[in-house]
Image (tube, rainbow, N blue to C red):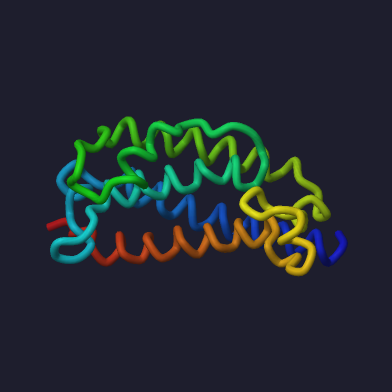
Amino acid sequence: MASDEVLIQTAISSWEQVIKRVGTLCLSCSAEQLLVEVAPGKNRISYLWGHLTAVNDAMFSVLRLGERLHLELDAVFIAQPDRSVPLPTSTEIAKCWEDVHTELLSRFKTLSSKEWLERHGNVSPEEFEPNPTRNRLAVLLGRTNHASYHFGQMMLAKPKAP
């Protein structure tokens, strides 16, 4: 395997690991645990789970991999802060989470190393020319970091079982 392929596979593996950890944590939470705030007056675990689902669903368009699966999540988890509107049930969030991440991983595996280094969908060809680091791989790395950040918040907030 060429070095660029190893780097891409390492990034995808890191993504998979973080996404698996978030999913495992959220699926192991009771309904009450999902409503715990990560800090007083801040987002609840369930909101962060939905937020990550919505943000990651946007990767389909940002990475130019096709249409989003759950655009409806934006109204709850992107456009509004927690507690502004009723949240979907944990079962609904879990289904969306699984849909988005199964399909993203499937599409990630179709991209060549060269394609990972192409511009992402939020940058024009003219903007990309002088700054080729604004590529698909940068989006994957950024979204992995974003998920890791919220995973840490969730881990600290999740109440321990008695």
Q: Looking at the image, which residue is at 19% across and 66% down?
A: 39
Residue 48: percent from the left, percent from the top? 32, 52
Residue 78: percent from the left, percent from the top? 36, 47
Q: Is residue 35 above or below residue 67?
A: below
Q: Looking at the image, which residue is at 76% across and 54% down?
A: 125
Q: Is residue 33 left or right of residue 130?
A: left
Q: Is residue 91 left or right of residue 140?
A: left
Q: Is residue 108 left or right of residue 5?
A: left
Q: In the figure, residue 79 lies in which quadrant?
A: top left
Q: Looking at the image, which residue is at 81% across and 64% down?
A: 4
Quarter of the rendering occupied by the N terminus: bottom right
Q: Is residue 59 left or right of residue 24?
A: right
Quarter of the rendering occupied by the C terminus: bottom left
Residue 108: percent from the left, percent from the top? 68, 45
Q: In the figure, residue 117 lies in which quadrant?
A: bottom right
**Numbered-mark total:** 0
Q: Is residue 146 above or below residue 115?
A: below
Camera-side residue of 26 and 70? 70
Q: Looking at the image, which residue is at 25% across and 33% down?
A: 89
Residue 54: percent from the left, percent from the top? 43, 43
Q: In the figure, residue 61 lies in which quadrant?
A: top right
Q: Residue furthest front?
A: 126
Camera-side residue of 130 and 63? 130
